[in-house]
Image: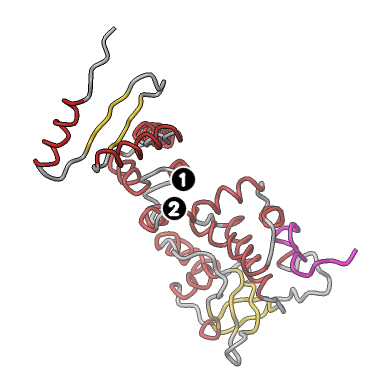
Amino acid sequence: MIEDPRRRGLGRGLSALLGEEDAGAETTARTIRIDLLRPGRYQPRHQFDTPGLETLAQSIREKGVLQPLLVRRHPGLADAFEIIAGERRWRAAQLAQLHEVPVVVREIDDREALEIALVENLQRQDLSPLEEAQAYQRLLDEFAHTQEAVAQAVGKSRSHVANTIRLLELPTSVKQMLDEGRLTAGHARALLGASDPQHLAEEIVRRGLNVRQAERIVKRSKSASNAKAPREKDADTRAAEHELTLALGMPVKIDPTRDGRAGSLSISYQSLDQLDEVIRRLKRVPTAIG
């Protein structure tokens, strides 16, 4: 069977992606000036925790950068290198005022660059749920991976990948709350399918609800929406409305009860003359007795 090059490397784990299980890959570290390094285009992380970087910088001041960064030659800048894994160490090294850092240079294509950056962040420093969802979606869209293949690459279940990607369906304002940490992934998943997720998200944040409480208010909201939703009228009711509207020359609406045994009938008039006309016609209708 011919191997699909788009899936090469999936499911092998971070050590394999970094070349630690590949005898032909360059693994010897060398030092490179910090100013020659550039952030990776496929870095899934959008926000870097400032206190965490300060802590890492202090460790680097005392012990140096213990693990080399993984880089590739920059595709657009001569003599520059693009960081594939280790951007936090690079940022912390700058805070520690280092001039050089150890790196391992490898030839890595764009697909592998995204895979490695995603796996490294998931295994070594958790991404926010939204960053994780966006990275999964990029693997699906840009490199034609299946959800099953993505799940194997990052060591997660397929259902986890599918449910995480669904978070991208939420409104922008709700995704911003999620990205800022005001909502958890559990809160966000509860909001999926809600009729007004933004309003409910604001209520969850304002009241400080936990996930179980959030699920309950979303369920109540869905029940209320279903109760208010108009029922589909059957063909006989629609036909009766149409015949009466033609006969009176005014819009007629019939609202039967759920069991169809009773209901209400309303006639819309646009003037007092029309109302008088309806009254006259009703008075002329003979009453059935007995």
Name the residue nearer the viewer: 13 or 135. 135
- 11 falls in the magenta region: yes
Q: Position of residue 251 (x, y in %)?
A: 26, 42
Residue pictured at 58% horizontal, 61% vertical: 137
Local SS, label 1: loop
Residue pictured at 38% horizontal, 46% vertical: 197
Q: Is residue 163 above or below residue 26?
A: above
Q: In this rendering, would 217 be left or right of 62?
A: left
Please name the predominant secondary structure of the magenta segment in the image. Answer: loop
Answer few, some or many: residues within 10 Å of disc 2's Cα (few below 14, many 20 plus, some between 14 and 19): some
Q: Position of residue 73 (x, y in %)?
A: 64, 84
Looking at numbered disc 2 in the image, what kind of residue is underneath it?
A: Leu
Residue at far right of view: 1
Q: Is residue 99 above or below residue 196?
A: below
| Residue labelled with disc 2 | 170
Residue 212, numbered label: none
- 146 falls in the magenta region: no
Q: In this rendering, would 147 be left or right of 33?
A: right
Name the residue nearer the viewer: 22 or 264. 264
Q: Is residue 186 above or below residue 213?
A: below
| Residue labelled with disc 1 | 192
Quadrant of the snapshot with the N terminus:
bottom right
Looking at numbered disc 1 in the image, what kind of residue is underneath it?
A: Leu
Q: Are marks 1 and 2 in contact (CB under 8 Å)?
A: yes
Q: Is residue 63 above or below residue 32?
A: above
Q: Position of residue 146 (x, y in %)?
A: 69, 58
Name the residue nearer the viewer: 159 or 85. 159
Q: Position of residue 196 (x, y in %)?
A: 36, 45
Residue range in magenta is 1-16
Residue at far top of view: 290
Q: Quadrant of residue 105?
A: bottom right
